[in-house]
Image: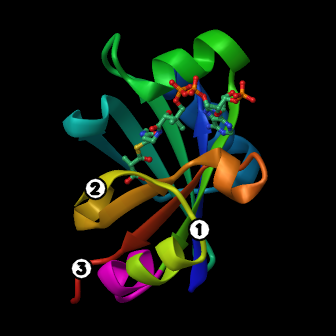
Amino acid sequence: MRLDHVAIAVNNLDDAVKQYKEALGVDEVEIENVESEGVRVAILHLNNSRIELMEATKETSPIKKFLATKGEGLHHIALETEGIEKEVDRMKVCGIQFLGEIRPGSRGTKIIFMHPKSLHGVLAELCSHPKS
Ligand SMILES: C[C@@H](C(=O)O)C(=O)SCCNC(=O)CCNC(=O)[C@H](O)C(C)(C)COP(=O)(O)OP(=O)(O)OC[C@H]1O[C@@H](n2cnc3c(N)ncnc32)[C@H](O)[C@@H]1OP(=O)(O)O
C-alpha cells in the first residue's frame, strides 16, 4: 500500500487551481467531472504523488455537506493498492467499516471509502489504478 493522494474540498475549483498552481509551481493539472460522486476534481501532479482539489457539482454531493459543516480543507487521504478486492476483505476482518461498494473514481481508478470513525477521525479512500 502507498499514499496515492490527499484530497481538499474547495468552494471554487477554478480559483483554488490558480492559487495552488502558482504556490506549488505545478504545471500539469487534469480536470475531471466524477458524476457518480457529485464532484469536479483537479488533479495536481507532484513527484510521485498528487493533490486533488474537489468542488461539489450537486446538492447531494458529500463535498457540499462537508463544506457547509466544516468549511474548506483536507477532506480525505487515498491509499493505493494493486488488489483492492482482497484488501477490502482483509481490512474488514480488522474491523474497518467501508462506505458502500467498490466503484469507479477519477482517472479510471476503482475506489471505496472507509468511515472516519474506523481510522481515528480520518476519511480514507482505498484505490486501484487501471493496469497500463
Ligand atoms: C472522485 C473520487 C476520487 O478520488 O477518485 C473522490 O474523491 S469522491 C469524494 C467524495 N465522495 C465521498 O466522500 C464518499 C465517501 N463519503 C461519505 O460517505 C460521507 O461523506 C461520510 C464520510 C460518511 C460523511 O457523511 P456524513 O457527514 O453525512 O455522515 P455523518 O453526519 O454520519 O458523519 C459521521 C462523522 O464523520 C465526520 N466526517 C464527515 N466527513 C468527514 C471527513 N471528510 N473527514 C473526517 N471526518 C468526517 C462527521 O463530522 C461525523 O463526525 P461526528 O460524529 O464526530 O460529528
Q: Residue at x 75, y 46 (%)?
A: 121
Is the residue 26 above or below the residue 84 in the image?
Answer: above
Which amino acid does the dot numbered 3 rest on?
Pro
Q: The residue under label 2 is which amino acid type?
A: Glu
In the image, which residues are magenta? 81-88
Amino acid at dot 1:
Gly
Tell me if 43 is positioned left or right of 128 in this view.
right
User: Front-most of 90 and 63?
Assistant: 90
Kindly report the distance in space between the C-alpha atoms of the residues bearing marks 1 and 3: 27 Å
Q: Residue at label 2?
A: 101
Q: Is residue 11 among the parts visible in the rendering?
A: no
Query: What mark, if any, has residue 95 been given in the picture?
Result: 1
Indicate the position of residue 14 as horizontal and vertical percent values: 48, 26
The kind of secondary structure element at disc 3 is loop
- Judged from the image, the secondary structure of the residue bearing numbered disc 1 is loop
- Please say if 54 is above or below 10: below
The part of the image, by quadrant, that contains residue 1 is: bottom right
Sequence-earlier tag: 1 or 2: 1
Q: Is residue 17 magenta?
A: no
Give the residue number, with chain letter if any, for mark 3: 130
Q: Give the residue drawn at x 32%, y 77%.
A: 129
Q: Dominant secondary structure of the magenta stretch?
A: helix
Ligand 1 found in image quarter: top right
